[in-house]
Amino acid sequence: MFTPSLSSEQQRDLAIRITTFLSQYSHLSDAYIIEFFTEDLWSTLPCSWQPVLKDLSYPQIADLLLDATHGDRRYPSVWPLSLLAFRATAHALAFPRQTRVVSMPEEFVENHSQSSLLGHIFRKHVKPKKQHEIRKLGVLVKDICEQTECSRVVDVGSGQGHLTRFMSFGLGLSVTAIEADHNLVSMASRFDGQLLQALEKEKQKKKCSSQLPTSQSSPCHVAGWVNPNASWEDFLKQLKTSNCGSEGSPKPSGPSKKRLKHQRHAPDIQGSEACACPDNTSPSQSFDRTSQQQQSQTSSSENCGSHVQPVCEDVSDKAEDSPQAEDFVLTGLHACGDLSTTLLRHFVKCPHVRGITSVACCYMKITTRENPVPPGVVEGPIPPTSNHQPLPAEFGYPMSSWVRGLPGHPLSYKAREGACHAIEDYVRRLREDSQLLRTHCYRAMLEAFIRNVRPDLRRAGIQTIKKAHLLPFAEYARLGLVRVGLPAMLPLDAERMETMLDQQVRVVVYFSLSMLLAPVVETLVLLDRMIYLQENGVDSQLIPLFNPNLSPRNFVLVALKSQ
């Protein structure tokens, strides 16, 4: 499962072919669909493409353009070879997003809101998408821990701690979670406490008296921003200086029922882990059906209430028990923008990181040489000696020397933003002939009317207008105009409105052509990371772990290091 899927030569050759292809069609990947009318985007398509595409139905767009697996293609007219080659090349260059076509994972067949493979204790506060992700990724991390002989995990960008809880309580791993948002850290600790209460109730129902296995202590939550410019040594210090296991944390000397009850029901929401010793079986056995074969372990009462130490120690410190004590596995579930690349660099450079599972998202927030401060990026604390956030020392893309040296390797903000779209969901809308597709045309029309009055107001942020697809355009325009500071009753040319509305299919076709390139852009971003790892002596594999119909960013980059 973890052998490299592509050789070094294959990876580099694929990068050459992708950059060459994307360079040729950058006008599609870089175009904003809201400028369809203002920039006359339809005229930028090859003349031979326009007549065969302009009258396609929405289901035909899905079947003939976007769905690579559709076998029975029936063309309403003869397509030019250049268009067929464009579609075939886009499909061929993109990493396969799923091994077989399944619209909904089997675990949600009986109940669309609850995974049948994840115990109820781990489903609380968790949406179906996240249930699917934490179960699949948690089991994968467990496998990597077994292969690397590590039991310690650092979960970066942990949010509300759903994955952290499953790995800790469900899979018996020692987990430190780090999250920049203090509110989310508090919520994670509170949810830990609720889980411990549920375990206590379950224990009372079963009238069990034994404790959790020694390895299954509560996770440690750290509130902190992972600085992409910081060294791996600083990253380790950031973990060590957390208050997990600190002297200020309560340390019960024995299995006092009163003290245990306090620990279970009132975890420290500021970051130190809660302690519990419930249940005579592992929660993974009692509540998680994915781990029914896991052996139950027991612990002595002397271990009850002891705090888990941070998974990392300062590199200047020596582990007192064994050299393995400092080793751990890094994971990040949809770590945003440069956070994913920062973790990969720590994995390569830090001798204590033995494995990594990286699930990326928000490619448009990756830093590049052309765009070192992309919009929407949450800035970290500004150093006291500086008046502004320093520029990154290393960029999020490209990471590898190979891709950096290829002509045509730059990816625009728009191209990377497009790579975050859910193509499976869009195909479904096309096949359903969804009225939601109307909003593409509406927004492009509104942009044209705005530019008539304010030529300088380009791509102004209007945000989502509720149920826009159900509104007449005039009403949609009235709501949108006021959001950009223009009068709601701005006169609209009725004849021009009708002319643009008649081109709704063309707008959707153009957007679909750009969507066809989205998986190719994502492939290049992830391939660059694989080549970076290979350049540093580490083989990796990209696995389509999640069902893309449920979780569009479904690739996990997996890599292991020898000790």
Image (tube, helix red, strand yellow):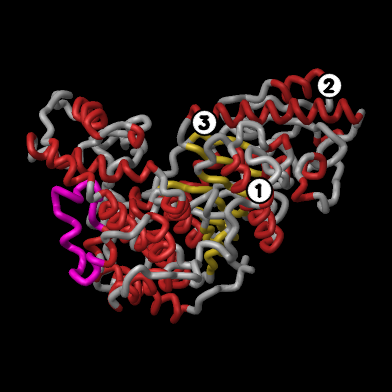
Which residue is at a point 67% across and 39% down the rendered structure image?
A: 114
Q: Amino acid at mark 1?
A: Arg
Q: In 3D space, how far apart are the residues under numbered discs 2 and 1 (Cα atoms)?
A: 32 Å
Image coordinates of residue 430 in percent, x first then y, are 41, 52
Q: Is residue 248 visible?
A: no
- Relative to 386, 355 lies left or right: right
Would residue 74 be counted in the magenta stretch? no
Q: Quadrant of the N terminus?
A: bottom right
Q: In 3D space, how far apart are the residues under numbered discs 3 and 2 (Cα atoms)?
A: 30 Å
Residue 397: image quadrant is: bottom left
Residue 286: image quadrant is: top right
Numbered circle sitting on residue 257: 2
Would residue 43 be counted in the magenta stretch? yes
Numbered circle sitting on residue 135: 1
Q: Amino acid at mark 3?
A: Leu
Which residue is at a point 31% across and 52% down the rendered structure image?
A: 508
Image coordinates of residue 189 in percent, x first then y, are 61, 29
Which residue is at a point 48% across and 29% down the rendered structure image?
A: 182
The residue nearer to you, when weighing 359 against 68, is 68
Q: Which residues are magenta?
A: 30-51
**Disc 1 crowd, CA 10 A, few/some/many (<14, 14-19, 20+):** many
Image coordinates of residue 66 in percent, x first then y, are 41, 62
N-term-proximal mark, 3 vs 2? 3
**Disc 2 crowd, CA 10 A, few/some/many (<14, 14-19, 20+):** few
